[in-house]
Amino acid sequence: MKIFADTADIAAIRSLAEAGLIDGVTTNPSLIAKAGAHILAAVAEIAAIVDGPVSAEVAATDYDTMMREAAVLGKIAPNICIKLPLTMDGLRACRTLREEGRETNVTLCFSVNQAMLVAKAGATYVSPFVGRLDDINLDGAQLLRDIRTVFDNYPELDTQILAASLRSANHVTEAMLAGANAATLPPGVIEALVAHPLTDKGLQGFMADWASTGQSIL
């Protein structure tokens, strides 16, 4: 499964990329605002750090303005993936951009029916929001499983499932088991994937035993 960093924090992206832990980055207007960055400058810097897709989201809600914004975002770098809202205008823009050879990521998916329409529009990625469904007592992981089943039923659909709104290591496990093609995670959740109390305990034991030998590798 591909792992994308869901952030506009340049330092965090650079650290994760240097460790070889991410395959791309997703951003949105909220993350840009949180980082206090200018969208064009931030996206350009991110695209220079990672080789994989960088999702840059349009801010418009109508087709014509979406297309103009997509043209500006698409000129930033070859690895820009245009992120669009799951609306009728967003799906129309998705189809047009895919016909132009652009990668697209349609976001804010909350149902199988929506995911099917995104795939029909030819999107590269559909982003189902797991955590936000859990927030209202629905099963976000079940949505991933259902979309996987439907997409597998129709092999002509090549849209990838990009699990979003993942807030914990358990969410990531559920996304992998559901067959998501990719998952986008805040940097803190990516770092949490490495943590396990038995790993920490075992390392402490190794270090104590090593110290008792009085040896040095260097």
Image (cartoon, rainbow, N blue to C red):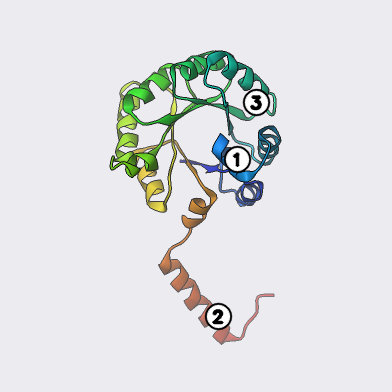
Quick one: label 2 or label 3, which is nearer the N terminus? Answer: 3
Question: Can you identify the residue that label 1 sits on?
Answer: 33
Q: Is residue 176 visible?
A: yes
| Mark-to-mark CA distance, 1 and 2 | 48 Å
Quick one: label 1 or label 2, which is nearer the N terminus? Answer: 1
Percent from the top left, x then y, of residue 96?
Answer: 54, 13
Which quadrant is home to the C terminus?
A: bottom right
> Which amino acid type corresponds to the residue marked 1 in the rendered image?
Ala
Judged left or right of residue 208, residue 138 is left
| Mark-to-mark CA distance, 2 and 3 | 53 Å
Quadrant of the rendered image containing residue 88: top left
> Which amino acid type corresponds to the residue marked 3 in the rendered image?
Leu
Percent from the top left, x then y, of residue 217?
Answer: 65, 75
Label 1 or label 2, whichever lies nearer to me, is: 1
Kindly indicate whether the residue at mark 3 contacts the one at mark 1 (C-beta within 8 angstroms).
no
Judged left or right of residue 44, residue 206 is left
Q: Measuring 66% from the left and 34% from the top, which residue is drawn there? A: 39
Q: Measuring 46% from the left and 61% from the top, which residue is drawn there? A: 195
Question: Can you identify the residue that label 2 sits on?
Answer: 210
| Mark-to-mark CA distance, 1 and 3 | 17 Å
Q: Is residue 91 above or below residue 20?
A: above
Question: Can you identify the residue that label 3 sits on?
Answer: 73
